[in-house]
């Protein structure tokens, strides 16, 4: 049974002049207990909107127009805002990119963790404070007894991210969603934070949905990779399958931008151009405007996400691997 099951999720933004941005357009995947699944893609690929949709945090002009999101087999996309608020923080822990953290600058670290704990658990202030100090120690914050009474600006970016992790795990969620959790941090701190996430995941048997633009990060921390482009999944598979038997031209391009991760892949050079805006995708394959292999049929219809014959856990959305296409 999956912790998270997303099926045919579509989140569109209705912009002015009848423009519709299909930010997430038919995305399906699951996360199993204890598993780390990474969603990878450039900015504008739809990965963050996927995360926000799962947590029911889409605001106008955005709207989830189709699909289901199941948490432990229960649909959560039609819950009231009161019900979903209970799930957020309690069943789903969330960590965002550092500058976007939900740490409030005017409250102490302690007050924020205590408030979070008391929102979801029936404990008094004293008990919550003790638990908060315990959590801060658990995530490797030195002088926890003092830090609890400090304000966010008194901590470094890495320490603030540790506090966010403490808050995210405070109510023992079964699923942790981390959206670019280390993007704003120094390289050495990044590794420490990802190691901490990994450690907490194992300690609390959480499933993790890790969202990142950096495919280099995921090889070490994820079990499976989902590559998104133009609001759709274009390739998915286990980390080793994806890195060693890379199929989609976009995934190859992403890997190409990393110097040493995989010497076996065909060298393509970096991906030229940029992600088209979600209200202006090309007809056909959404990567066709940038793909070095583009063919006539690519511009006619969107290829299907197709399981590879040799490995059922590996799927690719590209005509190069879709045999039923009759080449003209
Ligand atoms: Fe490139 Fe065509 Fe494959 Fe799209 S379907 S990725 S344009 S080869
Ligand atoms: Mg993002």
Image (tube, rainbow, N blue to C red):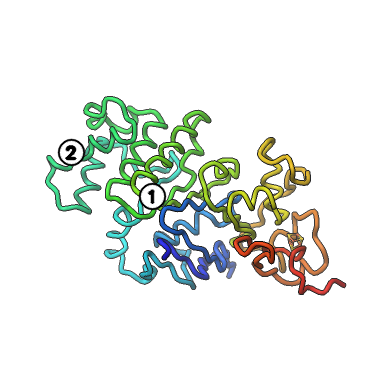
On screen, residue 171 above or below 313: above
Q: Quarter of the image holding residue 83?
A: bottom left
Q: Position of residue 37 (x, y in %)?
A: 50, 53
Q: Residues within 10 Å of mark 2 (few under 14, many from 20)?
A: many
Frontmost residue, 80 versus 216: 216
Q: What crowding class fits label 1: few (fewer than 14 Cα within 10 Å), some (14-19), or many (20 or more)?
A: many
Q: Badges 2 and 1: C-beta atoms under 8 Å apart?
A: no
Residue 266, image x, y percentages: 78, 46
Q: Residue at x 49, y 36 (%)?
A: 184
Q: Quadrant of the C terminus?
A: bottom right
Where disc 2 sits, the SS reads helix
Q: Which residue is mark 2?
A: 129
Residue drawn 26% across and 29% down?
A: 144
Residue found 31% across the figure and 44% down from its top: 167
State whether label 1 is within 8 Å of ligand 2.
Answer: no
Name the residue tied to disc 1: 94
Query: Is residue 59 among the parts visible in the rendering?
Result: no
Task: Report the disc number at residue 314.
Answer: none
Q: Nearer the viewer, residue 60 or 125?
A: 125
Name the one closer to the observer, 58 or 46.
Answer: 46
Q: Quadrant of the N terminus?
A: bottom left
Alpha-carbon span between mark 2 and mark 1: 21 Å
């Amino acid at each position: 049974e999956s912790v998270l099951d997303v099926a045919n999720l579509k989140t569109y933004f209705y912009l002015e002049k009848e423009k519709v941005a299909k930010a997430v357009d038919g995305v399906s995947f699951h996360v199993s207990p204890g598993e780390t699944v990474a969603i990878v893609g450039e900015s504008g690929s739809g990965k963050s909107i996927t995360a926000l949709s799962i947590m029911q945090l889409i605001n106008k002009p955005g709207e989830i127009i189709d699909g289901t999101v199941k948490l432990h087999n229960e649909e959560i996309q039609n819950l009231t805002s009161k019900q979903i608020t209970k799930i957020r923080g309690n069943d789903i822990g969330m960590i965002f990119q550092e500058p976007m953290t939900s740490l409030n600058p005017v409250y102490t670290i302690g007050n924020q963790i205590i408030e979070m704990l008391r929102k979801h658990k029936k404990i008094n202030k004293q008990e919550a404070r003790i638990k908060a100090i315990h959590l801060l120690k658990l995530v490797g914050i030195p002088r926890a007894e003092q830090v609890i009474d400090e304000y966010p600006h008194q901590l470094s970016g890495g320490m603030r991210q540790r506090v966010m992790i403490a808050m995210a795990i405070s109510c023992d969620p079964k699923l942790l969603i981390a959206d670019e959790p280390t993007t704003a941090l120094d390289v050495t701190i990044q590794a420490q934070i990802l190691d901490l996430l990994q450690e907490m995941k194992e300690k609390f048997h959480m499933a993790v949905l890790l969202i990142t633009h950096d495919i280099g990060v995921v090889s070490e921390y994820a079990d499976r990779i989902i590559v998104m482009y133009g609001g759709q999944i274009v390739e998915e598979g286990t980390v080793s399958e994806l890195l060693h038997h890379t199929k989609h031209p976009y995934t190859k391009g992403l890997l190409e931008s990393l110097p040493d991760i995989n010497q076996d892949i065909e060298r393509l050079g970096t991906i030229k151009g940029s992600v088209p805006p979600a209200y202006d995708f090309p007809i056909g394959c959404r990567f066709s405007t940038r793909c070095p292999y583009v063919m006539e049929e690519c511009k006619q219809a969107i290829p299907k996400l197709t399981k590879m014959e040799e490995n059922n856990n590996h799927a690719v959305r590209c005509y190069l691997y879709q045999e039923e296409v009759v080449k003209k």
